[in-house]
Image: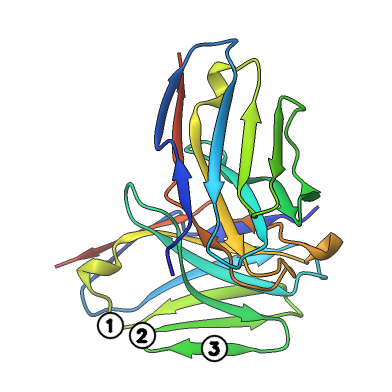
């Protein structure tokens, strides 16, 4: 099976702009989670989607949003970008998101905000 | 919410020696503890995981132990090799809300020297 894929791999934006990142899970996986990775804060949970519904949400401002489509592909959107949003954004998919099933990570999207 | 502490932040060992990384968690309801390895510029990859109904799990040179009473779990790598050099992250989750929400430790940079 193909692994988790993310597009684009790299993005450069300026403050105030918005950005949309995409994640395609492993075939058959229904849960998609998003994480932000920065040198200072490490890996932090953003949100999780299962069957097109947001099931869990981390402590991020409302500028961060997401959605999931019927084919389990997911997108996350960041509006009004700030310098501090520069990070590696990782998505992870799992079979049914029971909380104890393995999460497989994508390669990430490196976002740079200038 | 859950809090995971990880030590040490950096670890340098000689090839062939053992390496131990320790994590503690705060939420006694946590029931799943994965370990991820992340090489520079690559995605986190699961190397081993343990569930709360098991005290120890081993996979070739890698083992994980869990002490639920003390709320800590450890990663043990024996006979280390240069290719083990990477950042290792521990994580914990309670599966709250029926879904995935991993809380990660801050990572350990392991360097295996020849």
Q: Closer to the N terminus: mark 1 or mark 2?
A: 2
Q: Chain of mark 3?
A: B
What colour-coding does the image apply? rainbow
Residue located beneath label 2 in the image: B61
- Quarter of the image for residue B45 reads bottom left
**Which residue ends up furthest to the right in the rendered image?**
B97
The C terminus of chain B appears in which quarter of the rendering? bottom left
Q: Is residue A29 left or right of residue B107?
A: right
Q: Closer to the N terminus: mark 3 or mark 1?
A: 3
Q: Position of residue A32 (x, y in %)?
A: 64, 54
Q: Position of residue B2 (x, y in %)?
A: 76, 56
The residue under the point 64% across, 30% down is A77
Is the residue at mark 1 from the same chain as the one at mark 2? Answer: yes
Q: Chain of mark 2?
A: B
The residue under the point 33% across, 46% down is B41
Q: Is residue B51 left or right of residue B28?
A: left
Secondary structure beneath label 1:
loop
Residue located beneath label 3 in the image: B57
Q: Position of residue B58 (x, y in %)?
A: 48, 89
Q: Residues within 10 Å of mark 3 (few under 14, many from 20)?
A: some
Is the residue at mark 3 from the same chain as the one at mark 2? Answer: yes
Q: Chain of mark 1?
A: B
Cα distance between the residues tagged 3 and 2: 11 Å
Whether B94 is drawn above or below A52: the answer is below
Cα distance between the residues tagged 1 and 2: 7 Å
Whether B50 is drawn above or below B87: the answer is below
Cα distance between the residues tagged 3 and 1: 17 Å
Which label sits on residue B79? 1
**Which residue ends up furthest to the front in the rendered image?**
A70
Q: Nearer the viewer, residue A40 or A105?
A: A105
Q: Position of residue A75 (x, y in %)?
A: 62, 39
- Quarter of the image for residue A79 reads top right
């Amino acid at each position: 099976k193909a692994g988790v894929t993310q597009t684009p791999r790299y993005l450069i934006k300026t403050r105030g702009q918005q950005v949309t990142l995409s994640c395609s899970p492993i075939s058959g996986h229904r849960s998609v989670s998003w994480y932000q990775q920065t040198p200072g804060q490490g890996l932090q949970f953003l949100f999780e989607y299962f069957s097109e519904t947001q099931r869990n949400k981390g402590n991020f401002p409302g500028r961060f949003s997401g959605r999931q489509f019927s084919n389990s592909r997911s997108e996350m959107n960041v509006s009004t970008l700030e310098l501090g949003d520069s990070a590696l954004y990782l998505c992870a998919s799992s079979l049914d998101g029971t909380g104890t099933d393995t999460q497989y990570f994508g390669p990430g999207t490196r976002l740079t905000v200038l | 919410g859950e809090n995971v502490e990880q030590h040490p932040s950096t670890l340098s060992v000689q090839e062939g020696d053992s390496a131990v990384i320790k994590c503690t968690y705060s939420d006694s309801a946590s029931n799943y503890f994965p370990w991820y390895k992340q090489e520079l510029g690559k995605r986190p990859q699961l190397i081993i995981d343990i569930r709360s109904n098991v005290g120890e799990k081993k996979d070739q040179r890698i083992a994980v132990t869990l002490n639920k009473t003390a709320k800590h779990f450890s990663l043990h790598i024996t006979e280390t090799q240069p290719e083990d050099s990477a950042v290792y992250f521990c994580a914990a989750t309670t599966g709250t809300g029926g879904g995935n929400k991993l809380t990660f430790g801050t990572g350990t940079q392991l360097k295996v020297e020849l």
